[in-house]
Amino acid sequence: MRKMLHDDAIPAYSQMMKSSGRLQWLNGQPLFATMIAESRQATGNLDINVAIGDQAALEIERRQTEAFVTRRLKVMVQSFDPTTAVIQTSFDSIYLLYTTLVEATELLAREYEHVRGHSIDLQALTEDIDHLLAQVHRIKLPEQFPVHLPMDRLGKVEMAEVEALPKDERADKMADLTATVRSDMLEAGSMDPVTRSITAAEPKVVTLADNPEVAKDVDLAGQEQQALAEFTNLVMASADTAQIDHDLECQSALARDAIVSLYPATQYAQTTAFAAFGRPVVKAAVLGNQPVRLHLAGEAFAVVLPHAFTVTFRQGGRQNGKVDQS
């Protein structure tokens, strides 16, 4: 670590500090990003946009390159900013790297002093090693068998009995269990089968009373006919023109919603996307600044449109529920 610190880390840090002046100088050059962007599109560039001469795509690429170079250059220059606010908020600050190097140096110094404070008696250590080597032939190593394996096949009661035995008897008991497990594994037929409790499924008998209530059929066609008739009576000034210039009291929600859905057509030049009861709108215009209030019978609130307006429908369509082919 000491060698890496002095041979690699500190020289690299010094070189980075020397480059800060160059980065700040480049950041002050207004044409630097433009030169980089233009160099990407110089002669020999194999980009397809250069080959076909797509100036629009090249201009977009040039602006993106300029923005990227400017942004990255500012980030690199900010890394050398010595202010406290930048150091605490930037993960790339060069001063955080300086702090890391200082802490590594202090850590190495503490470890060096720690090592110097310990002395080893090499002669006594050598005598202990020689004594162990002289007795190595008397050391008997047990066979490498997982100690936990025989314990895994015991129940809680058997486990408690083994743990309650003295240390010497516990070792003998474990040796017996090890031999038993080995023989059981060789004779898979001696292992007890896995038993699971099975709950019989009781089929649920469904009767006619369990059926959900059938919703009542709604006469949608009849409601639409009534709404069309009400719409015609309330706002149709002629066969193709509807005029909404005063407050209206509606009896049908379909008629009220149809009137409300026509108002946005006044904000568009192309109005064919708007329609009422199947008739597309050809033209829509605002009539003054008077707001129009639409109230549906039975409701406690009303819809207020900002302006009165008029719409002209395409010729033909339904009049009071009948198809007009004129």
Image (cartoon, helix red, strand yellow):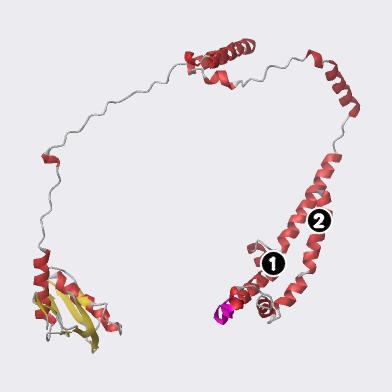
Residue at screen point 20% across, 33% down = 204
Q: Split into 4 quadrants, where in the image is the C terminus?
A: bottom left
Q: Element at badge 1?
A: loop
Q: Position of residue 5 (x, y in %)?
A: 81, 53
| Left or right of residue 5, residue 149 in this image | left
Give amino acid for label 2: Asp
Q: Position of residue 301 (x, y in %)?
A: 18, 71
Residue 251 found in image quarter: bottom left
Residue at screen point 87% across, 20% down = 130
The residue beneath circle 1 is 79
Q: Is residue 251 above or below residue 186?
A: below
**In the rendered structure, which segment of residues is drawn in magenta?**
52-61
Residue at screen point 65% across, 63% down = 90
Query: Magenta part mainly helix, strand or loop?
Result: helix
Name of the residue lying farthest toward the front: 52
Q: Is residue 124 above or below residue 235?
A: above
Give amino acid for label 1: Ser
The residue beneath circle 2 is 8
Nearest the camera: 172 or 310?
310
**Whether residue 317 is visible:** yes
